[in-house]
Image (spheres, rainbow, N blue to C red):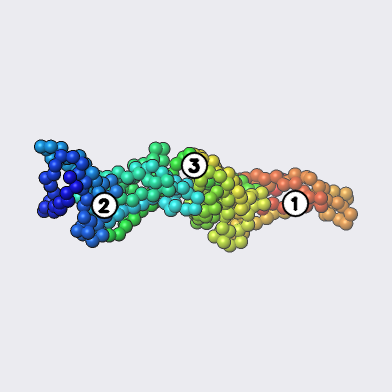
Amino acid sequence: NGVLQIVTTDANGNWIATVPAGSTSIDVDESTLPAGAVLSTVDSDPETITAMAGVDTSSTNDGYTDPLTSGTVSGVVFDDQNGNGIQDAGEPGLANVDVEITDSNGNVQTVPTDANGEWTATVPVGSTDVDVIDPIGSTLTTVGSDPETVSAEAGMDTTSTEDGFSNPSTTGSVSGVVFNDPNGNGIQDAGEPGIAGVTVEVTDANGVLQIVTTDANGNWIATVPAGSTSIDVDESTLPAGAVLSTVDSDPETITAMAGVDTPSTNDGYTDPLTSGTVSGVVFDDQNGNGIQDAGEPGLANVDVEITDSNGNVQTVPTDANGEWTATVPVGSTDVDV
């Protein structure tokens, strides 16, 4: 009938009004709520319902978030293509991933991540459990924390740890070895040890730099997104005076493949503390006296077989002047022309 009446909620927040049957408008006077209280987005106020004769017709419950007793928790779920637990440039958020929130009252709500992988939930203050439902086919990176418990604060947002997941459809690894190459042939022969503690700089297809260190065997590995990947051994972390073998390649660019490991070229370094060179000359001894006299030319392209102290064999040819040289580990070395 267009008649206005005002009722007040009781100690439990309930209210009731007697009305004639028919269309009835209901409006909570928000000026009488605690300061700053906000209607929950899923609720409806004001609201119009149809009152039925002889019975009670319920309106939608009206939930208000009180900044004195509630806050928000939030986070982000992303494709951690290099596995470092940080959302680096080029690493996209993962949309439509469910995050299960258990608040300090034990109530559970599930919120999905948005297009940027971000999520937020309004909760009462206190201990709040956050559990990301793992995306299909993806694995939480080892530095991430899920599930996690955070303490929601009144009237503010509390961020959880970013949750990075590695997906084999977009992520692979690159690897290599740094070793002591005393014979300088660029191949890790028997007896040639890896060099531990060497820094390797890996720049992935997104332009993100990560630094890895060789292990006790000189091996290193890095998780990266698929695509062009630059690898550079930090030679300042090698033994003093170590020199890259001429047949090896550093820095180097390789193409990382999704779901597999892509090896780089091994990097062999000659360490002056453990290696040296042997050399000689092969010549046309025209007078047979065993001395290269004036006018006796060197013999070019003669193979010289070198067996070093580790038992490794290399063959070097003489140059245009009949001269040859070979890098070898220290110790007894056999030379055979």
Give the x, y percent position of residue 313.
65, 44
Q: Residues within 10 Å of mark 1 (few under 14, many from 20)?
A: many
Amino acid type, callout 1: Trp
Residue placed most toward the observer, 14 or 75: 14
Residue placed most toward the observer, 232 or 244: 232
Instruction: Say left or right for 31 vs 119.
Output: left
Label 1 vs label 3: CA separation?
49 Å
* Quadrant holding the N terminus: top left
Give the x, y percent position of residue 152.
27, 56
Badge 1 or badge 3: first in the primary sequence: 3
Badge 2 or badge 1: first in the primary sequence: 2
Amino acid type, callout 2: Leu
For label 2, the SS is: strand
Q: Which residue is pictured at 47% across the width and 49% down the height?
A: 91
Which residue is identified by label 2? 39
For label 1, the SS is: strand
Q: Which mark is residue 324?
A: 1
Give the x, y percent position of residue 303.
75, 44
Amino acid type, callout 3: Thr
Whether residue 69 is visible here, answered yes or no, is no
